[in-house]
Amino acid sequence: MPAVPSTLPAIELSGVGKTYRFHRTRPGVRGSVRDLFGRESGERIAVADLDLQIAAGEFIGLLGRNGAGKTTTLKMLSGLLRPSTGTVRVLGHEPYKRGFDFLRQIAIVLGNKTMLWWDVSTMANLELYQALYDLSPDEFGRNVGELAELLGLGDHLDIPVRKLSLGERMKCELMLALVHRPEVIFLDEPTIGLDVVSKAAIRQFLAETCAQHGTTIILTSHDMDDVEQLCPRVVLIDGGRLQFDGSPDQLVRSTRPRKRVTCSYSGPIQPPGTWPPGVRPIDDTDRQRLVLEAEREALAGLLALAPSWGTLIDLEVRDAELDEVMQAVLSSPQFGNGLAAGVAR
Ligand SMILES: Nc1ncnc2c1ncn2[C@@H]1O[C@H](COP(=O)(O)OP(=O)(O)OP(=O)(O)O)[C@@H](O)[C@H]1O
């Protein structure tokens, strides 16, 4: 897990909103002709009234369903977009001004877009960034050496980027983004499409980067394993509005307070005709295993009864998975109206 963060605020958003203005296109040939003489315009509120404070060294998971406003938020934080309302401050800078001092201290990695130049090697790409960021040969050599070792990339730096596998390319992408040792990193789906081994390597690298260098990291991901393993704090947005801000555990308990109990038996099971109050079966079709959901107050009674249903050989009690919680949260009709407001900061 990442190091304990310092208390210095690295990122502050207050009353931040972003409204996109766009032109609608009419369908068909007649529509295209009419468009020549005047197009209808539309507006979409992607982010609204977002307040957030993030301390230096924090590792934050920015969650939400498709179209919730995560990428728009990252783009405002990295200066790619100017907010329509409110103020964004990152390390004391207003990102949209794109000052060199600011750009020198941040990095953004978009999992579905490449920053690497395909026809040359990663090393050639890195040398370009060395010139761009004005890194001394010593600093460049040290950073490249460290990153290559952490990412296990030693053999791949001289191969043209287009010949790398997806996982290797993503590691090179990270190396390029981090070669100037930024203080703040914005990651948009960095493990998208990767196999389990590459995902694990990238997660370990990110955790070590945050821990060793005190880097502030904001991660968006639809992979709840990324979030569970890396982020002590999650921020959930929907319709561009803040819905929850707290730890993954708080999110799990606020939405799925029941415990999941799995009882394994060495032989046939004889479950009761009626389940005790506060207990319901999730899966009782297996001949040697029962999966139950129990309210916390019903847990002690359930654990006392479980041995009477067969020869009990194993018992597991746990909270719901974050994945399961996110599914429940995102499909809930209340979501978007402050579902988890009780634990929102
Ligand atoms: N350039 C644009 N013009 C108009 N609308 C846009 C533009 N970019 C994004 N949007 C809209 O703004 C909303 C938020 O988009 P955004 O990309 O921030 O969502 P997201 O949470 O990153 O989604 P995903 O998880 O699918 O990447 C969406 O409704 C999207 O259609």
Image (tube, grey):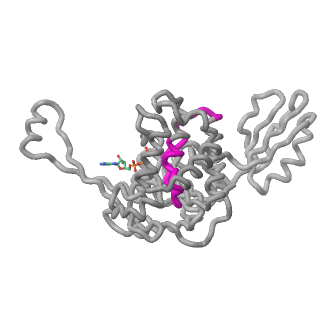
> Which region of the structure is painted magenta?
173-197
**Quadrant placement of the N terminus:** bottom right
| Magenta-colored stretch includes residue 339 | no
Q: Is residue 116 left or right of residue 255?
A: left
Quarter of the rendering containing residue 262: top right
Observer-nearest residue: 147 or 345?
A: 147
Rendering coords of residue 215 (x, y %): 58, 59
| Magenta-colored stretch includes residue 195 | yes
Residue at 54% across, 36% down: 157
Q: Is residue 328 left or right of residue 69?
A: right
Say if residue 63 shows up in the picture: no
Residue projecting furthest to the front: 137
Residue projecting furthest to the left: 37
Rendering coords of residue 34 (x, y %): 8, 39
Observer-nearest residue: 272 or 263?
A: 263
Residue at 76% across, 48% down: 318
Observer-nearest residue: 73 or 299?
A: 73
Residue at 86% across, 31% down: 269
Rendering coords of residue 38 (x, y %): 9, 46
